[in-house]
């Protein structure tokens, strides 16, 4: 019970602490000539940049001013919580990450969007890829968000290396089989170590910083080995054989195939290392592909391809647009959502290099002509596994990252760490409203 109180009630304690320490840090809603200024919090990713570039068009059409506050992921939730719990917060629109959904809905922090949708027949939730809408759109029978962008993970690899005659001959001589893009976790680890030529070239660029980064690396291998966080009875299963193998593989890759600085890498550093032409693979977010083919950002233009994560099941990722219950200007906020999620704007975001969630954008001839890897992205989304929907999802990430980082630092062995994670995940699931509903209790 003490452990559950420490973890299950952590959100409330964090919210109160941040509120007391951070009063006045968020932007203030300003009125100009009677029209509200919309304040929006977003993460610093390419899709945010594309939205910012199009916002002047919305301002001209509506007379509304839009202020987009762009933050690094690691500080977003901390800054957002006190605004969600306030009677009137600073933000009119927020973007919600997949692991926040259960917590935000259970706390009643998000405005249901169905009444707005009823009045906006030109915007239908049926246009969204079902896997996205079911993860960052609808909860139960209520629509709380509109899917904004997907960041489902897959394997990006150097296609030219797999066609290199010398590498092919060396690999066959060493392992007795043809060099091929890995479809299994075991082959992925083997090929990554084979292609490593320290200190100049590495088999894989990894994001192993404590937080969502190290979890992303482990979860893709965990899923590829057939694992999942909980069983059908909501009993934690991360200490299973699949969980242990995945963590042992992470340790092996970190030591024998990844650059020395990878334990401090998040996705930007992971991308930068491979874009310099210093790595053969990376398991990462599919929206990285256009960046690799941009000569301003990459030295390996035209040399990379995207495929399913090793083992065939990547981590399902996505963000959704939401209107907080505490939003000062809800009607104006909806005008923005209806505009930014219209087909025309969503298509232009995609053409700029964004990461769509609408099925019709994925099928658009102009989009497909520019980004022929999009059918592969649809396969990633169709085969990926989403995080469990409950109030403890974000804390689950914290626990996993804490223990995995200690393993990489040599402070714990993988089996001990996973045993601790299993116990804490079981505590998180106790008395959770979503778990009770799922188990009909």
Image (tube, grey):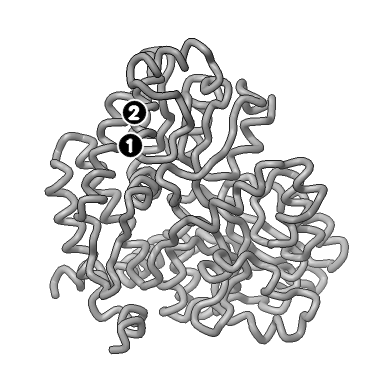
Residue 338 appears in which quarter of the rendering? bottom right
Image coordinates of residue 361 in percent, x first then y, are 74, 57
The residue closer to the viewer here, 265 or 372, is 372
Residue drawn 43% across the image and 30% down it: 205
The residue indicated by pointer 1 is: 186
**Count of numbered circles in the view:** 2
Vertical order, 235 against 382 (above or below): below
**Residue under numbered circle 2:** 190
Answer yes or no: is residue 30 visible: no
Find residue 441 and report its horizontal and vertical position in percent: 28, 89
Kindly identify the residue that appears in the image at 55 percent across and 65 percent down.
131
The residues bearing labels 1 and 2 have C-alpha atoms spaced at a distance of 6 Å
Does residue 88 lie above or below 403 as drawn? below
Asked if marks 1 and 2 touch (Cβ < 8 Å), the reply is yes
Rate crowding at label 2 as few (under 14), some (14 to 19) or many (20 or more) other CA atoms within 10 Å: some
Position of 314 with respect to 346 (left or right) is left
Q: Which mark is residue 118?
A: none
Percent from the top left, x then y, of residue 155? 49, 39
**Under tag 1, what secondary structure?**
helix
Asked whether residue 131 is in view, the answer is: yes
Q: Nearer the viewer, residue 204 or 13?
A: 204
Q: Secondary structure at mark 2?
A: helix
- Image point 66% across, 78% down: which residue? 330
- Left or right of 212 in this view: 360: right
Rendered residue at 74%/63% (across/down): 340
The one of 422 and 103 positioned closer to us in this rendering: 422
Q: 10 Å neighbourhood of mark 1: few (<14), some, or many (≥20)?
A: some
Can you give x and y, in whole percent of width and height, for residue 93 in the image?
62, 67
Q: Quadrant of the N terminus?
A: bottom left
- Against 131, is 212 above or below? above
């Amino acid at each position: 019970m003490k452990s559950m109180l420490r973890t299950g009630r952590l959100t409330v304690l964090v919210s109160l602490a941040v509120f007391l320490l951070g009063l006045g840090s968020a932007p203030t809603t300003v009125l100009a000539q009677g029209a509200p200024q919309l304040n929006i919090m977003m993460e610093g990713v390419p899709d945010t940049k594309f939205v910012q570039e199009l916002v002047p068009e919305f301002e001209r059409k509506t007379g509304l001013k839009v202020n987009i506050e762009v933050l690094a992921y690691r500080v977003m939730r901390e800054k957002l919580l006190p605004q969600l719990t306030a009677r009137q917060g600073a933000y009119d629109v927020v973007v919600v990450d997949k692991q926040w959904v259960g917590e935000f809905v259970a706390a009643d922090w998000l405005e249901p969007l169905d009444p707005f949708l009823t009045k906006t027949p030109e915007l239908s939730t049926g246009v969204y890829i079902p896997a996205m809408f079911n993860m960052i759109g609808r909860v139960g029978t209520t629509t709380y968000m509109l899917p904004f962008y997907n960041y489902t993970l897959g394997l990006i690899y150097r296609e030219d290396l797999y066609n290199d005659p010398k590498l092919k001959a060396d690999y066959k001589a060493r392992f007795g089989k043809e060099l091929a893009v890995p479809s299994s976790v075991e082959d992925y680890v083997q090929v990554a170590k084979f292609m490593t030529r320290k200190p100049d070239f590495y088999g894989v660029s990894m994001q192993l910083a404590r937080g969502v980064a190290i979890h992303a690396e482990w979860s893709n291998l965990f899923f590829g080995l057939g694992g999942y966080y909980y069983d059908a009875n909501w009993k934690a299963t991360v200490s299973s054989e699949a969980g242990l193998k995945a963590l042992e593989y992470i340790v092996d890759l970190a030591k024998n195939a990844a650059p020395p600085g990878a334990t401090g890498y998040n996705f930007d550093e992971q991308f930068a290392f491979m874009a310099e032409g210093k790595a053969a693979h990376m398991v990462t977010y599919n929206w990285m592909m256009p960046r690799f083919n941009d000569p301003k950002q990459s030295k390996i233009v035209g040399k990379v391809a995207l495929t399913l994560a090793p083992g065939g099941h990547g981590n399902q990722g996505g963000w959704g647009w939401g209107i907080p219950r505490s939003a000062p200007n809800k009607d104006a906020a909806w005008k923005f959502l209806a505009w930014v999620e219209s087909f025309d704007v969503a298509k232009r975001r995609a053409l700029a290099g964004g990461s769509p969630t609408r099925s019709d954008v994925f099928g658009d001839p102009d989009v497909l002509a520019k980004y022929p890897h999009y059918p592969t992205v649809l396969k990633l989304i169709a085969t990926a596994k989403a995080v469990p929907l409950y109030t403890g999802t974000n804390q689950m990430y914290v626990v996993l990252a804490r223990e995995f980082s200690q393993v990489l630092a040599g402070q714990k062995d993988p089996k001990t760490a996973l045993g601790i994670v299993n116990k804490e995940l079981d505590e998180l699931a106790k008395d959770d409203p979503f778990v009770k509903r799922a188990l009909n209790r």
